[in-house]
Amino acid sequence: MSWARRIGLSVAFVVAAVDVVAAHDIGGTRFDSPLPLTVLFLGAGATVGLTAAWLGRSEDLVPTETRTVGRLSAETIQGIRLVRRFGFTAVVVFAVIRGLVGRQVAAENVATVFVWPLWLKGLGLVSILVGSPWRALSPCRGAHAVLEFFEGSRVRLRVYPEPLGVWPAVVGFVVVVGVIENLTVIPRSPRLTVGFVALYAVVMVLGGTLFGRAWFRHADVFEVLYRQFGRVAPVHVRARNDEYVLETRFPWEECSSSVAEPGILAFIVAMVYTVSFDGFTNTPEYQQLLFAVRDVLTTGALTGVILYIIGFVGFVLSFVGAAAAVERLGNVTERSAIATARAFAPTVVPIAVAYELAHNYPFVLRNLAQALELGLHAVGQDQATVSLLGWLSLPVFWGTQVLLIVVGHVVAVVAAHEVAVHRYEPLARARRAHLPLVVVMIGYTVLSLWIISRPVVSG
């Protein structure tokens, strides 16, 4: 059976499972009704497992070639980038001003409506679809470029320390996305949001002045995050000679190459864990756990951070443990579990991407509509109302959640199969080595679907 037929049958299985869910009569609101868990978990887990089994029957690798669908001149791309950067910077400045002088209500202030839903989450979704736009949008990179223009040369006081790698971005991701966004009141306060943006800008500009452009590539949490999301983008733009080419590619193509440094491994693991923790914090079970641990440890507001760190450590250990099991089953003794983890780490990016897309696209669309309303009100259209979610019925909502998550896990299985076949020979050894990751992915599929099935608790 060809790879195309195997994956096609997997997708058909997912669609059948989604049809069952969509036909289920879910009462109440779209945010407080669980899915039929037994059918859903069995169907989703079987889809991931059967995909791995089918792929494991043949040494034929899934295709990874790219296709060129268009070309643009370097001048055109530069012009587009300038327009986007100036436009995005103008919106950021406007949001900062409104955050300081506007009404201090999260849903009615451009700062809170723009920074967290549209900047952080919205650009993440854009990166998933067409690759990271951040290098062309970053106001801090723009400020550094202006400084270099007036200096007439590269601005850099010191060479960026190679051992530092992307570890500043790892720390930044844990602090910004893991803690600030999920566990503090900052995203609900316009003025505190402005303070966050100002602090981020100061750190980026000072770092860029000290270490040059390398600082942004290694230390900017948004640049590293969106770059990882962009691994699965089916469309991307690549520089070639004196022009840029628009290419399409399979979503597993960039997810089957070993990461070059431990920092990227840590960032990917943190990313996969945190996107699920983000959803878990909205469930009643998390609230119960939070209050119980807080009462026992008397740690007050730090309890959420403690739970995040404990879960993160446990997730890292489980991933490294799975990597060690892969090496043991592959009968390769000269390699370390860390080297194996670095080889397979990109294969779990589709899992994080799928959950990020499923969990956040209604959130982004709702806040985009709110931002448009605020903009219309600013020009005197006080009666204007904008709705971008009118099409999202309850069956469609739950159906897309299930479809995105399961398809994301199937893509991850495909990528991991390709890595295993390249890394272990013969096929029987590769199949054995792949097994621990299949088990982990099935478990994570069920966990992700359980999280989205739970009622949402407002923070």
Image (cartoon, helix red, strand yellow):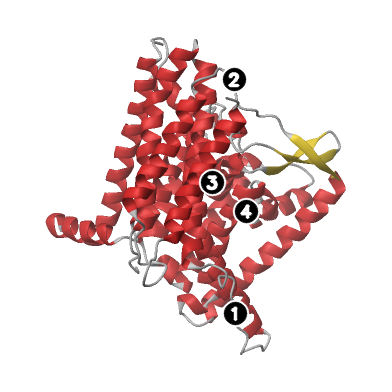
- Quarter of the image with the C terminus is bottom left
Find disc 4 in the rendering and name its residue. 126
Q: Earlier in the sequence, mark 2 or mark 4?
A: 2
The answer to whether the residue labelled 1 contacts the one labelled 2, judged by CB atoms less than 8 Å apart, is no
- Rendering coords of residue 420 (x, y %): 49, 21
User: What's the distance in space between the residues labelled 3 and 2, CA to CA?
Assistant: 32 Å
Q: Residue at x 56, y 53 (%)?
A: 124
Mark 4: which amino acid?
Answer: Val
Q: Is residue 379 visible?
A: yes
Find disc 1 in the rendering and name its residue. 374
- Rendering coords of residue 329 (x, y %): 36, 16
Rendered image: mark on residue 225? 3
User: What's the distance in space between the residues labelled 3 and 4, CA to CA?
Assistant: 12 Å
Q: Is residue 248 above or below residue 454?
A: above
Mark 2: which amino acid?
Answer: Asp
Mark 1: which amino acid?
Answer: Leu
Mark 3: which amino acid?
Answer: Leu
Nearer the camera: disc 1 or disc 2: 2
User: What's the distance in space between the residues labelled 1 and 2, CA to CA?
Assistant: 54 Å
Rendered image: mark on residue 60? 2
Q: Nearer the viewer, residue 194 or 340?
A: 340
Rendered image: mark on residue 224? none
Q: At numbered mark 2, what does the secondary structure look like: helix, strand or loop?
A: loop
